[in-house]
Amino acid sequence: MTAGKSIKFRNQLKLFTIRQVIFLISLVVLLFALLLLGISMGSSQLTVADVIKSLTGGGDPISNQVVFQIRLPRILAAIVTGAALSVSGAVIQTVIRNPLGSPFTLGLSAASAFGAAFAIVVLGAAGAGAVSHFEMISQMPWLVTLSAFLFGVLCAFLITGFARWRGSTPEILVMAGIILTSLFQSGTSLLQYISTDVELASVVSWMFGDLAKATWDKVWIQIIVVVPAFLFFVYNAFSFNALSAGDEVARSLGVNVDRLRLLAVVVASLCAAVATAFFGIIAFVGLVVPHVTRWLVGHNDRIVLISSLFLGGVFLLLADIISRTVVAPVVIPVGIVTSFVGAPFFLFLLIRKVRKSR
Amino acid sequence: MDIEVKNLRFGYGKEDILHDLNCRFDNGEFCAVIGPNGSGKSTFIRLLARLLTPKEGTILLDGKNLENYHRRFLARHIGYVPQSGGNSPMATVYDTVMLGRKPHIHWFPGKEDVRKTEAIMHDLSLSNFAHRLTSELSGGELQRVQIARALVQEPDVLILDEPTSSLDLKHQIEVMNILKGISRKNITVIVAIHDLNLAMRYAERFVLLKYGRIISMGDHSIISEKNIKKLYDVNIQRVEAEGGSYLLPEY
C-alpha cells in the first residue's frame, strides 16, 4: 500500500470516530433540550426560562416546587428508565444473538406483571376504595413494587437455571424466555380471573407503564442500579463484540463465554426489573432503541451501548412529552405511546428487509 | 512455542472421538493435520486451541499444561480461525480485525492496538475496505480478515480449521502463501486440511488421523501411497516432479 493510501485509511478511521462523537454530542444536547421542554410542560405553565431559573437556583418558590417536586422526578425517571431499558435490550440482543431480543423476550415483563398481580390479589395490596385508576396507582404500596421486582429477579434466576441445566446458548435462553413468559402470563390470567373488580382494575392499571408513579426515591434507586450495570456493560463491550462473532471465536479471544452471557442477562434483567417494578410495562423501548442505534452508528457494541443509553433517554422522554400533550389535559400512560411505536417500527424493519433482499 | 500432546483422549458421553493421541509440534513449524471426514481433525485442533477440554491426557504448551494457563494468557499466545462463521456479518472489517486485540485490552483500544491492527491489515491487503461490512466480502477476503484477526492477537501458535475449503484455486494459494509467510516469522502454524497437494506443497510436518487415532506423523515422506490408501481407502500415485511431489488419485 502506498503512503497516500495509508494516510487515507487513517483519515477514514478518524472520520468514523468523529462522526460517532458528533452523534453522541447531538444526543446529549437533544436530551438536555427535551429535559427543559419536558419540565416546562404541564398544567402549571412554566416557560423554559422559568425552568432554567429554578434549576440554577434563581426561581420563585412555586416554580421551584413544581420543578423539583413534580416535574423533575418524572422527567429524570423517563430518562433513566429509557436508558436502562435500551441498554438492557442492546445487551440482550447481542448475547442471545437475536435481533428481537429485549429484557421482555426473556419473560421479564410477564414475571413482573405476575409479581404485581400476586401482591394485589393474593397479598391484598389493591387500592381499595379508589374511584379512578390514577387514585388506584397512588394508593398502591411499595409491596406491589417489591413483589414485581422480586418476580423479575426470580425470572432472571430461572433463566440462569435453565442455562446452567441445558447450556447457555442463545437458543436455550430464548426457549427459556418463551416458557417463562407463558407460565407467568397464565398465572396472571388466573389471578385476574379470581380477583375482585377493584383488584382487576388495579392489576390492569399497573400493567400500563406509567411514569406518573415517579418519585425522587425511585429515581435514585434506579440510578444506583443502572450506573454500575452500565459500567459493567461498557467494560465488557469488547467481549460482547467477540460474542457477536460466535462463541468459538470469543473463547479463542479469552472470553469466558458462558459466564459473560449469564452475567449479562442477569444484570440487564435487573436493570429492566427495577424499571418495570417502579413504572409497569413500558414495551418496545428495549427493542426499538438498540435497532435504531445500530442503524445510526453501526454494530460496534462500545458505541452502541453508549448511544443506546442517551437515545433511550431521548426516546422515552419524547414519548412522555407526547403522552402528556397529545390529549391534554388528560395524561395517557407512556407505555401506551411506546407500544404504538412498535407497529410502524416493525413495518419499517420489514420494508428495509424487503428492499435489501431485492 | 512448542506443543506436546500426551495420551490425549476426548469424547462426548461414553463414546470417544480421539483415542490416546501423542504428538509434538515444534516452534515455527508449518504442520498439516490430515484425515478423512469424521476422523477427528477439527476436534483435535479445537483441543489444541483449548476450546475443548480433554477427557484424559494433557496438552503441554512450552512444558505447562494448557489447562493451567489463564484464558487471557492463552489468547495472547494461541490464535484460532474456525472453518466457517467466526464473524459478525454486520461488523466492519476494521472492527472484526481489532477484535484480535481483545486479550490485550481492558476498557478501550489504545494507540498501540490501533497501530498493530492497521499494520496487519496493511500486510494482508485489507486496508482498502476497512469499513466494509464483513457480509459484503468474498470468501477469500473474509478468510484474510479471519487470519488478520487471529494475527492481531500476536500469537505464537496459529491454528486454522480447513482455511481453504471454501476458496477457489487462486485464493487457496493466496491463503497458503500467507500462512507460509507467518510460519517463517517463527509462529507455529497448525492447519486441518483436506487438499493433500496443497498440504504437500506448503506444510513441513504432517499428522495423519483416522478414526480418532494417529496412524502416522512426520515429514513429506509419510504422505506415501500406502498411507493414503490406509487413510482414505483410495489408490493414489505420488509423482515426483520439479518443484515438489504431487498426488494423483486413481478415479
Image (cartoon, rainbow, N blue to C red):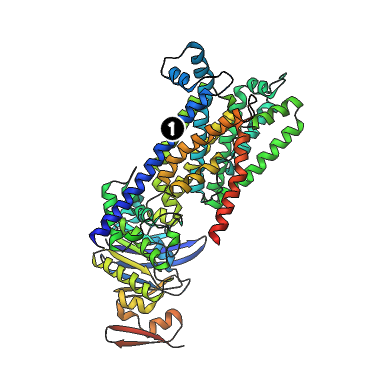
> Residue A284: where, in percent of width, then height?
58, 40
Q: Nearer the viewer, residue A265 or B42?
A: A265
In the rendered structure, the answer to whether residue A325 lies left or right of residue B106 reads: right
Task: Establish if B60 lies above or below A222.
Answer: below
Q: Nearer the viewer, residue B63 or A200?
A: A200
Q: Nearer the viewer, residue B176 or A211?
A: A211
Task: Establish if A17 lies above or below A153.
Answer: below
> Residue A145: where, in percent of width, then height?
59, 27
Residue position marked by numbered label 1 in the rendering: A227
Asked whether residue A56 appears in the rendered view, the answer is yes
Given the image, on which type of amino acid does mark 1 rest? Val
> Which chain letter matches label 1?
A
Q: Quadrant of residue B215?
A: bottom left
Q: Residues within 10 Å of mark 1 (few under 14, many from 20)?
A: some
Q: Which secondary structure lies at badge 1?
A: helix
> Measuring 29% from the left and 50% from the top, which residue is drawn there?
B113
> Measuring 33% from the left and 60% from the top, which residue is drawn there?
B128
> Measuring 33% from the left and 56% from the top, which residue is drawn there?
B65
Q: Quadrant of the N terminus of chain A?
A: bottom left
Q: Quadrant of residue B189?
A: bottom left
Task: Establish if A136 lies above or below A249.
Answer: above
> Measuring 31% from the left and 64% from the top, which residue is drawn there?
B125
Q: Quadrant of residue B48?
A: bottom left
Q: Nearer the viewer, residue B193 or A310?
A: A310
> Residue B239: where, in percent of width, then height?
33, 88
**Count of numbered circles on the image:** 1
Q: Quadrant of the C terminus of chain A?
A: bottom right
> Residue A246: where, in percent of width, then height?
45, 55
Asked whether residue B62 appears in the rendered view, the answer is no
